[in-house]
Amino acid sequence: MALEVCVKAAVGAPHVLGDCPFSQRVLLTLEEKKLPYQLHLINVADKPKWFLEVNPEGKVPVIKWDDKWVADSDVIVVLIEEKYPDPSLSSNPEFASVGSKIFSAFVTFLKSKDANDGSEQALLDELKALNDHLKCHGPYICGDKVTAVDLSLAPKLYHLEIALDHFKGWSVPENLSLVHKYMKSLFSRESFEKTKAAKEYVIAGWAPKVNA
């Protein structure tokens, strides 16, 4: 039986998959495990009544699990891994936090209006740390195999690449070659192609935050 998942619909296009990286993380996990699922696209600007009844906080993603709706991508991917352990996506606990500060550093830099506030350097430091890790342990964070930590990071790096290029004309420096290779490898996976938001919807999703 297919698992039911609620994810964000695209801004201005409620019938198209939206730009939430946490929603994509859950969909990537389901795709990599080849699990059937039914998608409910939620217009977060006008959440349907049934959705708010089963999920009063109104957050996405949520998944229907044993007749209850469960929120939070961290919780959801653990539930999926425990119930459907094959193929395993378990990450080495030692490396579970690799890259975990990249997203917040990206958001701070994206919203920054001050070129001297250190936010660009903070992001570069996080990306360099990822590059150094991949040099020792790559091509993926836990070695030769894609694991949960990669599926969490991939959508965030996709947002970083699109949003910083569009709003700041900025891209990941070429000398961080292993980060480039890592991103290219993850973005070209069939699971990623099937679950990514179109570039224009990523831009539309970030525009209000950048222009705030």
Image (tube, helix red, strand yellow):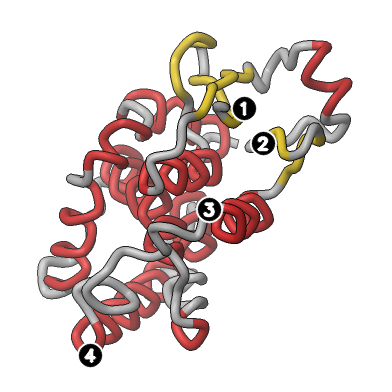
Q: Which residue is mark 3?
A: 84
Q: Which residue is mark 4?
A: 136
Q: Secondary structure at mark 2?
A: strand
Crowding near pointer 4: few (<14 within 10 Å), some, many (20+)? few
- Front in this rendered view, residue 136 or 114: 136
Residue 73 versus residue 180 in the image, above or below: above
Determine the image quadrant of residue 186: bottom left
Question: What residue sits 71% from the left and 33% below the top?
Answer: 64
Q: Quadrant of the N terminus?
A: top right
Asked if labels 1 and 3 touch by Cβ distance under 8 angstroms, the answer is: no
Q: CA distance from mark 4 to mark 3?
A: 30 Å
Q: Secondary structure at mark 3?
A: loop
Q: Which three-letter amino acid code belongs to the residue tagged 3?
A: Tyr
- Counting residues from the N terminus, which is met first, the one under dot 2 or under dot 4? 2
Question: What residue sits 59% from the left and 31% below the top?
Answer: 3
**Image coords of residue 23 (percent x, y):** 54, 39
Q: Secondary structure at mark 1?
A: strand
Q: Which residue is mark 1?
A: 4
Determine the image quadrant of residue 166: top left
Asked if labels 3 and 4 touch by Cβ distance under 8 angstroms, the answer is: no
Looking at the image, is mark 4 or mark 1 nearer the viewer?
Answer: 1
